Image (tube, rainbow, N blue to C red):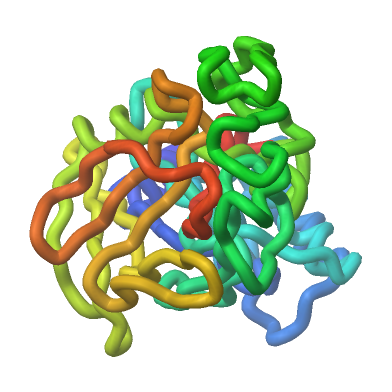
Amino acid sequence: MKKVFALFFALLVSQVAFAQNGDVNGDGTVTSADVTILYNFLLNGDTSNLVNWDQDGDGVITVGDVTSVYNILLGLPIHEYVDLGLPSGTLWATMNIGANSPEEYGDYFAWGETTTKDVYNWSTYKWCNGSDSKLTKYCINISYGDNGFVDNKTELDPEDDAATANWGPEWRIPSKEQINELIVNCTDVWTKRNGVWGRLVTSKINGASIFFPAAGYRWDSEFGNVGSFGSYWSRSLYVNSKNAYYLIASYANNLWCPESLRSSGESVRAVRVSQK
């Protein structure tokens, strides 16, 4: 038991913020033996040959680690996340949708759209008929609805969520409340990571951290403010229904959550609430 306790203590202190490569026993390959080692630990605390502990980046050994190794064996994509110890249990992805590392910018999406495109404005926006006063979904104000359309939807449906559509049902774009929880429970500093400017966000609770690169935004066919701030959608509609809440990671200010035009192209940082 002392050995098991020592292992868990080491895991909690280290707060591993990245997934390993599936090679649990450190033999240089990923096989069914790696899954067996994790099962032996979960069932009876056996630490024999347990070298690379945390496979899914949550800081502890759970069934989620077994799933991560299975996905590697099956050739499925692994989306890494970090447990920041947040009260809600929300787990934040380590990188943007469309990125291959935490400092890559990734893809840009209009709010409620699940694919990228070449031009971002109201004439190309999926949920309107050509202008911001002709919304066809997610409208709570008749002044902005097409022919007075209102559906009173204030949060993206899963089928319109870029995180869910691209990464699977366990992932969502964060709500305004989840973004505000991140802001309240973390500190953030403007810094460079591998030559890329952005905000390093560190938990006040457990010291784990994530990086938001300054990917800027898209409008029409242009990029704006790349390198000076990052803009990240929430899944929550702003009170006027023409805009939506988003997270800003700027060189000039700490993280905050104002509003942005739904038709602009912004980054997406996904969240999940389960380690399984």
Q: Is residue 242 above or below residue 52?
A: above
Residue 95 picture location, percent across and down = 49, 63
The residue furthest front is: 147
For the residue pair 247 and 17, the one nearer the viewer reads as: 247
Q: Please name whichever residue, 86 or 123, is drawn nearer the observer in this view of the structure.
A: 123
The residue drawn where x is 54% and y is 24% is 144
* 33 relative to 255 in the view: left or right: right
Q: Is residue 141 visible?
A: yes
Residue 47 appearing in the image = no
Residue situated in front as seen by the camera: 111 or 68: 111
Q: Residue at x 10, y 53 (%)?
A: 253
Query: Where is residue 69 drawn, in percent x and y?
Result: 75, 61
> Residue at position x 52%, y 14% from top?
141
Q: Is residue 93 above or below residue 256?
A: below
Q: Position of residue 8 (x, y in %)?
A: 42, 44
- Residue 244 appears left or right of 45: left
Task: Locate the C terminus by quadrant.
Answer: top right
Q: Is residue 219 left or right of residue 211?
A: right
Q: Residue at x 59, y 61 (%)?
A: 97
